[in-house]
Image: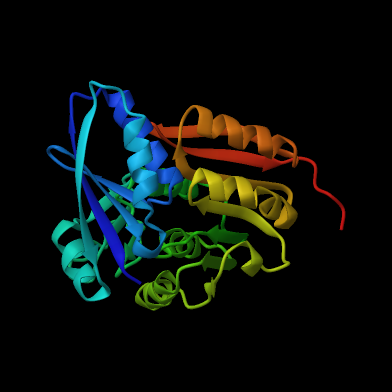
Amino acid sequence: MDYSELTFCCIGEEEWQRDLFINDLAALGFETFEDTASGFKAYIASASLDIVAVENVLLTLPENFQVSYTIRQIGPENWNAVWESNFEPIVIDKRCYVRATFHEAKPDFPYEIIIDPKMAFGTGHHQTTSLMMEYLLDAPVAGASLLDMGCGTGILAILAAKLGAKEVMAIDYDPVCYDSVKENIELNQVSFVKVRCGSKEAIPQDEYDFIFANINRNILLDQLADYSEVLKPDGQLFLSGFYDGDDLKQLVETANTLGLVFSDKKVKDNWVAARFKQTNKRQK
């Protein structure tokens, strides 16, 4: 799968205006964002790129917020060079060290994850991934079952396995992500993690103690009912891939209709990870 890299040059904006702009791009399907000296880069699967929709968003920006952009296509053969040039090891909550195969190991950390993302997103660098990892590190997943939706590189599923989860299912609709997860599972020696390629239709009819879904607002709203169906009574659901404010409000309102009650949230640069608890499990 090819990806498109849009580099936005921003002049005169307030921070909140840029946040809203990025939120609108996320709603169009852009999957990850990277700050630059003059603005930011945004990545989307080329097949999903709608330039007319992007231009329509630009028309809604205030007069003081001037934006120009360029587009670059990134084929699979170039992706490794792109992420290797930008991928530095990171530490999550002083407990989990995330590195690539070409970085030095650091066995002093309680948990180490090796990630080879290829064309898949999710290395822990983005705010939403790191927030979800922070939640996961503190969740009582040892001996539990866990579903990772929109798994990307599989980083959350792999961390859950290293934390002692007994059953882990990772699902992503992108075949490239599917292949990446399988490779990363082998790299991290957690071969019991299961992987499926698909969307909500690929969710097994099992029940899970924990569900982690780091996607975007629109897909999460569409799939909330499916999560509720397979979340155990008193199970916990963690959502990310959206902004604080209206995005979270919409998700909370929809979740409430399904017996999923908002518990708490973590916020980083206006990105949110939120925890919900199952309180009204429907009988099957």
Residue 119 rendering spot, x and y as whole percentages: 31, 68
Relative to 251, 58 lies left or right: left
| Residue occupying image coordinates x 31% and y 45% | 94
In this rendered view, identify the residue nearer to me: 215 or 274.
215
**Visible in this render: residue 126?**
yes
Q: Hey, which quadrant is residue 266 in on the image?
A: top left
- Count the numbered circles shown: 0
**Visible in this render: residue 261?**
no
In this rendered view, identify the residue nearer to me: 133 or 166.
133
Colour scheme employed for the rendering of this structure: rainbow
Relative to 146, 283 lies left or right: right
Relative to 7, 266 lies left or right: right
Residue 11 rendering spot, x and y as whole percentages: 16, 29
Give the vertical position of 1 relative to 70 (above or below). Answer: below
Residue 117 rendering spot, x and y as whole percentages: 31, 67
User: The N terminus is located in which quarter?
Assistant: bottom left
User: The C terminus is located in which quarter?
Assistant: bottom right
| Residue occupying image coordinates x 54% and y 59% | 149
Residue 239 rendering spot, x and y as whole percentages: 53, 45
Give the vertical position of 155 relative to 7 (above or below). Answer: below
Q: Hey, which quadrant is residue 63 in on the image?
A: top left
| Residue occupying image coordinates x 34% and y 63% | 46
Q: In the displayed orientation, state which residue is furthest to the right.
A: 283
